[in-house]
């Protein structure tokens, strides 16, 4: 295999919907407070700077994708189009091993554990484990 390429959204649809609801609530709150006259000792403008940080994170949540490209030369991770966490390149000589594991859980009443997903990744020579993608549904997909 010459190249493995995996491009996925950073956030699932339900997380994007939740972030949009929160974003709209704070935007409405700031809009209402901005129209009101400023009173002595009332800090209605305090939420505005954190709101812009949350707006940036909302854009990243809605539009970003995580790209993993694995070749014989190494592994390259990147997030685009909104800059969020820098990309990373791991050369092949720094990779100790590639792995996959099953995320296991049990029912509330105990019983036999079962897999709810499977994750792939690499371990570097300095002992750092880097998960390369979100969970796969089956073990065959992860392999």
Image: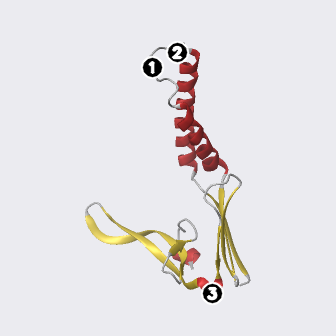
Name the residue located 54 percent from the left edge and 14 percent from the top edge: 36
Disc 3 versus disc 1: distance between alpha carbons? 59 Å
Q: Earlier in the sequence, mark 2 or mark 3?
A: 2
Disc 2 residue crowd, few under 14, some 14–19, many 20+, Cα 10 Å = few
**Residue 93, which numbered label?**
3
Dot 1 falls on a residue whose secondary structure is loop
What colouring style does the render use? secondary structure
- Residue 23 left/right relative to 102: right
- Where is mark 1, residue-wise? 42
- Where is mark 2, residue-wise? 38
Determine the image quadrant of residue 104.
bottom left
Which marked residue is nearer to the observer: mark 2 or mark 3?
2
- Residue 104 left/right relative to 92: left
Is the residue under label 3 in contact with that under label 2 (CB below 8 Å)? no
Name the residue located 57 percent from the left edge and 80 percent from the top edge: 143
- Residue 76 left/right relative to 31: right
Which marked residue is nearer to the observer: mark 3 or mark 1?
1
Name the residue located 52 percent from the left edge and 36 percent from the top edge: 22
Q: Quadrant of the N terminus?
A: bottom right
Residue 35 image position (x, y, % from top left): 58, 16
Position of 101 relative to 60 (above/below): below
Q: Earlier in the sequence, mark 3 or mark 1?
A: 1
Disc 1 versus disc 2: distance between alpha carbons? 7 Å
């Amino acid at each position: 295999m010459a190249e493995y390429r995996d491009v996925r959204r950073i956030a699932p649809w339900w997380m994007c919907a939740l972030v949009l609801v929160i974003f709209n609530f704070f935007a409405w709150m700031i809009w209402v407070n901005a129209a009101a006259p400023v009173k002595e000792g009332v800090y209605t403008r305090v939420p505005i700077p954190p709101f812009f940080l949350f707006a940036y994170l909302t854009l990243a949540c809605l539009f970003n994708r995580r790209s993993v490209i694995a070749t014989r030369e190494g592994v390259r991770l990147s997030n685009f189009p909104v800059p969020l966490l820098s990309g990373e390149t791991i050369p092949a000589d720094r990779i100790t091993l590639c792995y996959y594991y099953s995320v296991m859980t049990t029912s509330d009443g105990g019983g036999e554990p079962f897999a709810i997903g499977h994750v792939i990744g690499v371990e570097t020579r300095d002992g750092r484990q880097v998960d390369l993608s979100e969970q796969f549904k089956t073990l065959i997909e992860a392999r």
